[in-house]
Amino acid sequence: MAPKDKPYRIYRGGRVKGPIRPESPSSGRKAEKGNGPGPQDYRGPRRAKTRRRWVRPVAWALAGVIVLSLVWAVLGYLAFRSGIKEANGKLDPRAERALAPQDGIMLSNTSNILVLGADNGSKSRQGSVARADSIMIVHTDPDEHRIALLSIPRDLRVDIAGHGEDKINAAFAYGGPTLAIRTVQSVTGLPINHVVVVDFGTFDEVIDALGGVAIDVPKPILSNKFECPYGTEAKCDRWKGWRFKKGEQTMSGKRALIYARIRENQLDPNESDITRGERQQAVVSAMADEIVSFKEYFKAPFNGDDITKPLATDLSAAQILQLAWVKFRTPSSGTLKCRLGGIASNLGGVDYIVGTEENVSVIAMVTGKSAPQPPKPASGAYGPGCIVGK
């Protein structure tokens, strides 16, 4: 009977005592056919291919951050837009009709924004007719990456339609922002495209909502006495005034408002209403820096509507965001601080600043038609001009 084939093979072989010595390729010996690779083909243990397991979690984390950032930005914008809608409702419709049309979008076209600070909310002005405590034009030129802040002294003698010669800040008292817009357009020759009216009564709340503003005070100040912080007349009599040290400092809303409204510096009698305008420019610039800062982005959903409380304006939320982007892209070398001026005069027992032809040159500096020039030393404390830088 023939033996059955077995389903397996039996391998017999001997083992040589001692370590295995692989044959080198130079020996000429090859592995026997059918017995698999020889010892000379051994290249060590195989390494398992490691998957980059961190890629997927990181990708999901980045996607989550992007989505959260977008949601946060939308929430902040909605809060801000809600506040701006209220500010739009507070502006007299007649003032909006007095404005010159905006040419295109503000991101790529020049615009002139009139900023009026009303003093009807201050303690010292309660019960009196409100006048414009601050008058400033913000001229933006996105193509040239330029922003010019033009301060107009409130004692500047001008012709107010229907009321004759008077101080320019009286236009606001006679006809509100509507007459103020028309008067400023007549004096400067600049078309006013937008207006922002700031109520100084709640102005400090905006700065507090921003967490304060950093302002570089050029020299020590001891102000005249106004809005005494003490509750008794005896303490107010002993009080010498508001003090500000020289150097950069972070101011609360109350301190910044006081700084912007100081008329006289007891430590420097040469200061004037022109110097006061420079301080107001510093506060406005500091606020703009805070509004476009990265940290304000994180607080936007919580205080987006708070920073618009003291405002009455025709600007939409989208337009203000465009202004913020123009401000962000403008370097320090593209920022001008300008002022109108003239000669101090007393007419009929009233102190005025009578404008000179140099004011025409300042307007040309603001619009970029001529190079900026600082006030001439011979022009005194009320000399008009422009300086470059923040």
Image: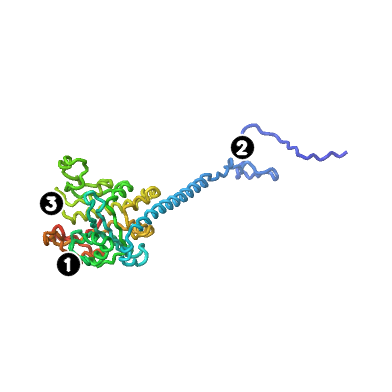
Disc 2 is placed on an element classified as loop
CB atoms at circles 2 and 3 under 8 Å apart?
A: no
Q: Amino acid at mark 2?
A: Arg
Q: Amino acid at mark 3?
A: Pro
Residue 358 in percent (x, y) is at 17, 65
Q: CA distance from mark 3 to mark 1?
A: 26 Å
Disc number lying in front (1 or 2): 1
| Mark 2 residue crowding within 10 angstroms, few (<14) / some (14–19) / many (20+) | few
- In the image shown, does 27 or 335 lie closer to the viewer? 335
Q: Is residue 351 left or right of residue 331?
A: left
- In the image shown, does 44 or 141 lie closer to the viewer? 141
- In the image shown, does 215 or 112 lie closer to the viewer? 112
Residue 286 in percent (x, y) is at 28, 52
Q: CA distance from mark 2 to mark 3?
A: 103 Å
Q: CA distance from mark 1 to mark 2?
A: 106 Å
Residue shown at the point (66%, 33%) measured from the top left: 16
Mark 2 or mark 3, earlier in chain: 2
Quarter placement of the C terminus: bottom left
- Quickly name the residue at label 3: 269
Q: Quadrant of residue 49?
A: top right
| Mark 1 residue crowding within 10 angstroms, few (<14) / some (14–19) / many (20+) | few
Disc 3 is placed on an element classified as loop
Q: Is residue 189 left or right of residue 4?
A: left
- Quickly name the residue at label 1: 357
Residue 10 in percent (x, y) is at 75, 37
Residue shown at the point (21%, 56%) measured from the top left: 277
Q: Amino acid at mark 1?
A: Glu
| Mark 3 residue crowding within 10 angstroms, few (<14) / some (14–19) / many (20+) | few
Quarter placement of the N terminus: top right
- Quickly name the residue at label 2: 21
Mark 3 or mark 1, earlier in chain: 3
